[in-house]
């Protein structure tokens, strides 16, 4: 990362960078590719087996361990093929394809997580930048106040205590600015972790905290919500696995064809078939089918539980988001105007000599605290919005496609 180009990113650019570069997403893509190759293999016949050997080789007498002298000794070469019916191969192929879908759901889960973490990191940096700007504005104001107080002291209109008070106020605001700068720097480092690019700044305003996720119908939500998509894929995999197990109750036959050459150069052909005997089907094949059926039932129950969990989480985040928007509106209508008015009154009193510099600073400090309080609430609401909005993937990446 240290050798990467330093950049300033908008939210969309950060999301694009993380989607293109994140190694967790690339690893999930490799997993999808691997399972796709396995799906092709699943529908094929097993490879044939080449058999070669010597039959009826004498081990004693004058012809012991010799080939070609005893008429019963046979050189043999043949081929053997296990035959899997087309229906069975189709079922195995279906199972493999469902496993590809499950891996794709895992890929979508990685995409959603990376996008969500990137969005939250960008928002944290954006609000940290705004908080730093407020602290820097206060430092500028207090620097101005200190210079004015020193000038007033030289004109015998202020006391030495007023100058010391101004110096203390400036030192405090400078320390607060340093803390705000560190918070911003740390936020940029966190964002760089997801974009895999050394981010030096964020640009653009945070989006309005409005989300349509809560209004998505269940069928559409299942397609774009990776947790639900994965749970649904688990059900399909379990059903397909049950179908394969049921097909295995019918054994596969193995055919063989051999060419034999005996002593005296007599030639023979041997044809045969091997048929497994399911003499214990009740405790082998049938129990395998029962096991897979139970696992399919488990997958269905887990899906139902996951659906309730996802719906509950979405409802909770939506309620929290709505409450946060209402609180922001109330603070902007009540707290900020009152804080601004207090600054105006305290400044006017100080300028007319009826108030102190300390009172003016306290009013300015209270104004900053009010602004930071609103800013912190906006950050909190935006992070809630990101948790809700980015728990789903764009429809173009949905599991159904």
Image: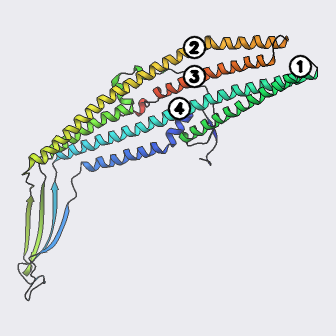
Residue 41 position in % (x across, y down): 27, 50
Query: Residue 91 is drawn in which quadrant?
Result: top left
Q: Count of labels shown?
A: 4
Asked if the residue at tag 3 contacts the one at tag 1, i.e. Cβ–Cβ closer than 8 Å, the answer is no
CA separation in Å, label 1 and label 4: 51 Å
Q: Separation of disc 3 and disc 4 at Cα?
A: 15 Å
Foreground mark, 3 or 4, reads 3
Residue 378 shows which numbered tag?
3
Query: Residue 357 occupies which quadrant of the picture?
Result: top right
Q: Disc 1 versus disc 3: distance between alpha carbons?
A: 41 Å
Asked if residue 10 shows in the view, the reply is no
* Residues at circles 2 and 1 in contact by the CB criterion of under 8 Å: no
- Could you tell which of marks 1 and 3 lies nearer the N-terminus? 1
Residue 326, placed above or below residue 187:
above
User: Along the polypeptide, which appears first: circle 2 or circle 4?
Assistant: 4
For the residue labelled by badge 4, is the local secondary structure a helix, a strand or a loop? helix
Question: How many residues crowd mark 1 within 10 Å: few (<14), some (14–19), many (20+)?
Answer: some
Residue at x 91% of width, y 17% of height: 157
Q: Residue at x 53, y 31 (%)?
A: 120
Q: State the residue position of label 1.
A: 158
In this view, the mark in front (1 or 3): 1
282 or 35: nearer the eye? 282
The residue wearing badge 4 is 119
Upstream in sequence: badge 3 or badge 4: 4
Question: Label 2, on which residue?
Answer: 329
Asked if the residue at tag 4 contacts the one at tag 1, i.e. Cβ–Cβ closer than 8 Å, the answer is no
* Circle 3 crowding by C-alpha within 10 Å: few under 14, some 14–19, many from 20: many
Point out the tag, 2 or 3, that comes first from the N-terminus: 2
Residue 111 visible in the current orientation: yes
């Amino acid at each position: 990362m240290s050798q990467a180009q330093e950049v300033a990113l908008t939210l969309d650019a950060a999301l694009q960078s993380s989607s293109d570069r994140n190694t967790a997403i690339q690893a999930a893509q490799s997993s999808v590719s691997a399972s796709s190759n396995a799906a092709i293999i699943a529908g094929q016949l097993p490879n044939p087996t080449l058999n070669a050997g010597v039959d009826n080789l004498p081990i004693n007498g004058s012809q012991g361990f010799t080939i070609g002298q005893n008429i019963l000794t046979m050189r043999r070469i043949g081929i053997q093929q296990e035959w899997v019916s087309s229906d069975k191969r189709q079922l195995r192929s279906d199972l493999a394809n469902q496993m590809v879908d499950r891996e794709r759901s895992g890929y979508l889960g990685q995409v959603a997580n990376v996008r969500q973490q990137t969005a939250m990191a960008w928002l944290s940096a954006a609000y940290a930048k705004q908080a730093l700007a407020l602290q820097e504005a206060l430092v500028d104001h207090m620097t101005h106040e200190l210079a004015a107080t020193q000038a007033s002291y030289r004109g015998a209109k202020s006391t030495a205590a007023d100058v010391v008070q101004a110096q203390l106020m400036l030192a405090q605001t400078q320390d607060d600015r340093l803390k705000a700068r560190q918070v911003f720097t740390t936020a940029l480092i966190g964002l760089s972790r997801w974009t895999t690019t050394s981010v030096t700044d964020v640009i653009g305003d945070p989006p309005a905290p409005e989300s349509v996720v809560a209004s998505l119908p269940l069928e559409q939500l299942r397609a774009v919500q990776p947790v639900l998509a994965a749970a649904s894929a688990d059900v399909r995999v379990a059903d397909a696995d049950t179908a394969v197990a049921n097909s295995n109750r019918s054994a596969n036959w193995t055919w063989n064809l051999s060419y034999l050459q005996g002593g005296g150069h007599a030639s023979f052909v041997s044809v045969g078939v091997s048929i497994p005997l399911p003499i214990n089907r009740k405790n082998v094949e049938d129990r395998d089918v029962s096991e897979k059926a139970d696992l399919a039932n488990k997958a269905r129950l887990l899906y139902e539980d996951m659906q309730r969990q996802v719906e509950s989480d979405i409802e909770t985040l939506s309620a929290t988001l709505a409450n946060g928007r209402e609180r922001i509106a109330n603070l902007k209508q009540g707290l900020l105007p009152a804080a601004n008015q207090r600054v105006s009154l305290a400044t006017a009193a100080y300028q007319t000599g009826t108030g102190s510099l300390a009172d003016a600073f306290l009013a300015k400090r209270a104004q900053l605290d009010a602004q930071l309080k609103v800013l912190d609430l906006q950050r909190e609401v935006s992070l809630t919005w990101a948790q809700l909005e980015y728990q789903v993937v764009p429809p173009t990446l949905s599991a159904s496609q």
